[in-house]
Image (cartoon, rainbow, N blue to C red):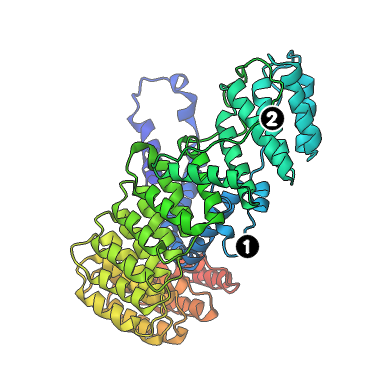
Amino acid sequence: MSIARCLVLALSAWPAAAPAQVAATTVPRLWRLDLQWIAPLIAEADARAQVAIAQAGPAMARAQADVMRAHAQIAPAMARAQADMIRAQAALAGGPWAGAFVRGEGHGFASTESEGYDRTPPLPWAQQDPADQIYRDARLALNRGRYARAADLFAQIYAKHPRSSYAGDAYYWQAYALSKRDSDESLKRAIEVLRLQKSRAPNASTRRDADELMTRIEGRLAMGGDAVAAAQISAKAIAAAGTPPPAIAAPGVPAIAAPPAVASTAPRGRGPRSRDACDDDDNMQMAALNALLNMDADRAVPILKKVLARRDEGSLCLRRKAVFMVSQHESRETEQILLDAARSDPDQEVRSQSVFWLSQVNSPRVVPALDSILRSASDPVLQDKAIFALSQQNSSQARQALRDFALRSGVSDDLREKAIFWIGQGNDPDRFEFLKSLYGQMKSEALRDKILFAMSQNDARESRQWLLQVAGDERETIDLRKKALFWVGQSNYPGPELYALYEKMPSKEMKEQLIFVFSQRNDRAAVDKLFEIARSDTDRELRKKALFWLSQSNDPRVPEFLARILEKP
């Protein structure tokens, strides 16, 4: 009995149970409501609830089917999009490896750096500061691309108002404006200004960004043939590998009239960008490695290899970024470097990203590497990545690796389910026979369920016939039989043959499932079959099921049919 009906009975019984001596005027007004008025409302609500309950199960089944199909269709595209997105984000966000993927198309470093490393000074924060208006004008000029004017105005801030709260960061923004101009003279001047900031305003909020900017500028100069800049880049790149860099004599710096040292009073977070823990100390070194990779990849790759071999606590962020850089420069060592990182790095993210990027490398050596990870790894997350990576490789070796894993006992059902899923998405002509054989070997109902879905993705008629055999096998669990029948109904299985199954199905429960399957078919013949069941089935409950699903149909013939049913005595 529903809650609503129980409530009606309780309300109708309440007056009889009330003490006789209670005066009518003492009964709360709520309880004096006319039951003839409220009962129909409760009955209507109850009917709506019953319909909602009846619809919930089928709706969830349809949603599950839609999700599984969508996942099968978009997952490969998502993987490619993820790789493209990571590359694009690196360029747009000005990451230290932004130029790493311009390989094979000339150097292109200067354009990538200048376009990818875009910064905007923070909004003015000290209206009473004597340099406030100059800062506003300088910021406006920079944002409008008037770099010469911006550089001049930022220089005026620390020259005229050395104790201004804007002075410490003005060095950085002057150098940044100078770096946006395409001339070696402007770039060298920017380096001089950054060195001044380091000596005169060591506590400026932009100091870490200044070191990175200097490295970027040195990289551009080195690409233009500046030997000193190239030596600086090499030294910083080597330092990233944990090796002390060689001593390098800095070039002479022309004397610049410098104000007294100042400490920036800019509020915390007013630097050019907010960062996470992996975007601070190591950006200068990664920018140097990026520049070296574009200048001389043969020298950069061994250094990246050494970075990935580091295990000290401070190298974590470097290793995460180095994985990306290695993956963007294909060489004879790329697969081995990524494989070593996937197998031995203590950080799960480094391992996972190594496997992901390994799948994007176009080399015949990739599949054996991924297969070896899948076989030997003890980390389920890493194995999950390897399964997906193998599914993206268009080779018989990769497909065989997935089959071998699906057959393995002693591994988690979750991982085997994923291998089965991707096998079902493949285009092997013999996958039907493999899945059929695999089904007979599986004891887990969850794994058998995944095989049913995988089989449903095969358009061959023999797959549909096999699903129907499962549906009719009384040795199978009722849930698996229902799911097999559902997937047949969702396929392009011929309608007349499907509708003819109803009379042949001995189980009432499976007949109920067939009625539901018919209701999900978007064709006139399916409605005709439901009409037939509702009119003439000998089982009253089955007739009610057919009537219910007819009431949910949009077929224009249904209202008239239901009206005729209601007119019968």
- Indicate whether 498 appears above or below 48: below
| C-alpha span from label 2 to label 1 | 34 Å
Which element carries disc 2, helix, strand or loop? loop
Which amino acid type is marked by label 1? Gly
**Which label sits in the foreground, 2 or 1?**
2
Which amino acid type is marked by label 2? Pro
- Indicate whether 472 appears above or below 479: below
Left or right? Give the position of 255 relative to 472.
right
Q: Residue 532 appears at what percent x and percent y? A: 45, 79
Q: Residue 88 appears at what percent x and percent y? A: 59, 54
Q: Earlier in the sequence, mark 2 or mark 1?
A: 1
Q: Residue 3 appears at what percent x and percent y? A: 37, 44
In depth, the one of 375 and 537 nearer the eye is 375
The image quarter in which residue 459 lies: bottom left
For residue 209, say whether it is visible.
Answer: yes
Dot 1 corresponds to which residue? 106
Dot 2 corresponds to which residue? 254
In depth, the one of 112 and 24 nearer the eye is 112
The image quarter in which residue 265 lies: top right
